Amino acid sequence: MNRRVPMSIALDCEFVKTKGRVIVSSIAFVPFASFKAPLRQPHSVGHARSGTGVAKAQAHAEQSARPCMITSGGSTILSLDPTEVMRHADVLPCGHCLMPLLQGEAAVGSRQSLTAVEPHPSTTGKEKLPRNYEKMLRIVRSEAGLETLCPHSIPNIRRLDKTWLRALHAAAVNSAEFRDASAHLDHLRTYGNGGRQRWAISFLMKQHPQVLQDLLRKNFTTDDAWCQWLSACGDTVESELQRVAQEHRRISSAQSERKAHSKPGDHPLDSCGVQYKECKSLEELPRELSRTWSALISARAHVGGVKFYTYGNMDAKAIKNSLQLRGATANQAVKPPEGTGKGNDHPNEEEEVGCNLLKSPHEAKVVDLTRHPLFAASGFCISSRKAPPLTDALKKAAAVDVSARLLLESNSSHDPLWDAKALACVAVACGVVPFSNPPVQ
């Protein structure tokens, strides 16, 4: 890699929505580079014996070269213990794995039209409505199935009071019991109204409570059945979190074992290794994130620096929210107790930790690949304002990058490590990252 060129790192996050904030629950850092992979040319006996022929063949190969993504250093994964994710999440993460539960038999419903077409009187009128509001509402009224609900808005029954959730099904919408439950669940609206023709449960609860209740009653015979379905959603999500975490542990463990058995002179394994760190508390993960970020910046401070790439702006917001938590950065480190002087033989532990942290959340700067001019110029944008899903962008990158094709064969989207590698392939295909020297075989 050219030492004068900034190191490129692709990162991807998974999120946990808790206490009104969206913060990082898992993040992968994947250093990567771009090099020219010449197309294979048929060998010619005449060319092999002619210096001129060899030169022409090399020139043709250079012109025919295609970009190829390679990981250029060890990847790092920081993740919150799945049990802790489930303990803190207000709404369930991993919405993609809930689609079968939303589209199953319980989601068929009676297909009867729903009632209550007007917003509830308690609505303030200041609610920000989606652009396709009327279209989405028509779909909910006509379908009456759970597939009309946003999979990223399912309440976490393990964290919320079951009494509130039961009331959404059992209590009359004009009753004090329903209003009280709605007030207790109102904080869930912080996480959005839904999208892609799917409503968030919290949004329907506030804007169209009768529509929500009819939807629940048509799909669940009792409030117990409704709560059992929510519990099944929670179990599905935790299983998915555990599966991904176990895979990361396996990859990291296998890498450590290979290092332990390597001999002097062997090819270094750091170039393709994965370091996995599992944090046991919601407070530990932001500190590890800050420490890792600071170390990556410091390592390249005098040789070109580092550029961190994300796909969209959600990752940047979650990273900033995480680094704003108490103790995540050096400026937020806990101060030593009063009366502790500089001559203390046992310096405060938080002060020592703070030396290795970012000074401020503002140091965690990222480049949104979807906003880069070359992203649109390369034909990746669906429209002037909309970027395609990452997997769709990777399919387009696969037309020019063999690494992207190989990654598609092992599709594991929503795994931050896989997603970060996919982002790296798209960045290379766009030409955002300058070419480096080809890897040594």
Image (spheres, helix red, strand yellow):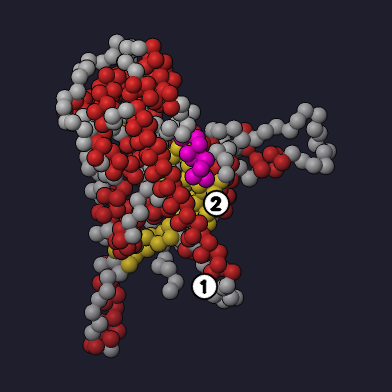
Residue 387 visible at all? no
Q: Is residue 45 left or right of residue 335?
A: left
Determine the residue positioned at 66% across, 43% down.
353
Q: Earlier in the sequence, mark 2 or mark 1?
A: 1
Quadrant housing the C terminus = bottom left
- The type of residue carrying mark 1 is His
Who is closer to the viewer here, 253 or 312?
253
The numbered mark at residue 267 is: 1
Residue of label 2: 277
Determine the residue positioned at 58% across, 50% down.
295
Vertical placement of residue 125 versus 26, above or below: above
Q: Is residue 346 left or right of residue 193?
A: right
- The type of residue carrying mark 2 is Lys
Residue 272 at x, y percent in the picture: 47, 63
Q: Comparing marks 2 and 1, which lies closer to the viewer? A: 2
- Residue contact at pointers 2 and 1, CB within 8 angstroms: no
Who is closer to the viewer here, 403 or 158?
158
The numbered mark at residue 205 is: none
Determine the residue positioned at 39% across, 25% down.
165
Who is closer to the viewer here, 342 or 221?
221
Residue 48 at x, y percent in the picture: 28, 86
Magenta span includes 45: no
